[in-house]
Image (cartoon, rainbow, N blue to C red):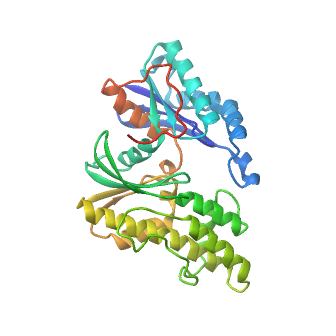
Amino acid sequence: MKILGIETSCDETAAAICVNGEIISSNLSSQEIHNKFGGVIPELASREHEKVLNLIVHKTLQDANYRLSDLDGIAVTQGPGLSGALITGCSFSKGIAFGLNIPIIGINHLEAHIFANFLADPSLLFPFVCLLVSGGHTQIWKVNNFGDYELLGETRDDAAGEAFDKGARILGLGYPGGPEIEKLAKNGNPKSVNFPRALLDSNNLEFSFSGLKTSLLYFVESDKNTKIEDIAASYQFAIIDVLVQKLNLAVQDTGFQSCVIAGGVAANSFLREYIEKKIPDKKIIFPDLKYCTDNAAMIAFLGEKYLKKGIKTNIGFSIMPNMRIA
């Protein structure tokens, strides 16, 4: 089965082809136009998708040595994401599906992030715990089986990736903030500033990062002596320390032997090192770096799984900007 996957939930325009569980072609275009604004501008994102989506799909087909007529189905991000961006991808995909008379399925972007770990390790077995951490979401999931998920905890306010972006803005760094802070933190002391870790002492799996962001703002305004590298390292450590300790608690509570990390923040090298240090007796799986941030490979991969089960979406489906995992 040859499945074309399309991803346009935010500021990455991506297409990929999955054939029997293997990604044979994948391309992505990142929208650099947002960098000067310090964040994604929804209207600009939609326009950029419209400019390059057809080119990205054409190149992806060309790389696979396929034509549109060779496709057996199409998978596209239905949500969550920016409304205009989702409309662009879904409308384009519906046009292809209708023209070729092939099935289409709307994919939950978050669920696809979880399944990106099967691309990293095809031997991964259910059940497992998943830390899903990105710019818009910070959640811990109990993944019992395909289609059987239980939310164990999530953030009450800012997501971890959002905290990185806002922290970078406070420190006068570029966008996206996570890689900028990570780069600066490599030359800093993570224990130089003791930033607060909200809900760390509570016996639950919930997160809160808004207070940390405020603490950073007050610290930067009042302290003129601490090196910015030390501030960045300490801020990063405060975020990751909470993520890892909550993940460890989830692993202990479930008794599962495997846990996976999903989402853009999964690319953070300090997070990877700290998890392996703090949870050494469990199987930890990280997706390849190219599958951490938004990509179409995970959309095509998950789409193929659904379509092989005969599950498809009515072509008149609507986008779901606030889509949650059922």
Q: Position of residue 249 (x, y in %)?
A: 32, 67
Residue in the foreground of this view, choosing between 4 and 103: 103
Q: Farthest residue in the right direction?
A: 36
Q: Is residue 22 visible?
A: yes
Which quadrant of the view contains residue 250?
bottom left
Q: Residue at x 59, y 63 (%)?
A: 164
Q: Residue at x 36, y 73 (%)?
A: 278
Most foreground residue, 109 or 214: 214
In this rendering, position of residue 205 left or right of residue 127: right
* x then y, percent, for residue 32: 70, 47
Q: Residue at x 43, y 37 (%)?
A: 23
Q: Quadrant of residue 189?
A: bottom right
Is 91 in front, or is 211? 211
Q: Which residue lies most toward the left here?
A: 255
The image shows residue 220 at horizontal and vertical percentages of 70, 77
Q: Position of residue 4 (x, y in %)?
A: 48, 28
Residue at x 48%, y 19% (from the top left corner): 315
Q: How many marks?
A: 0
Quarter of the image that includes the N terminus: top left
Compared across the picture, whether 189 is left or right of 222 comes to left
Q: Seen in the image, is 253 located left or right of residue 78?
A: left
Looking at the image, is 82 positioned above or below residue 229?
Answer: above
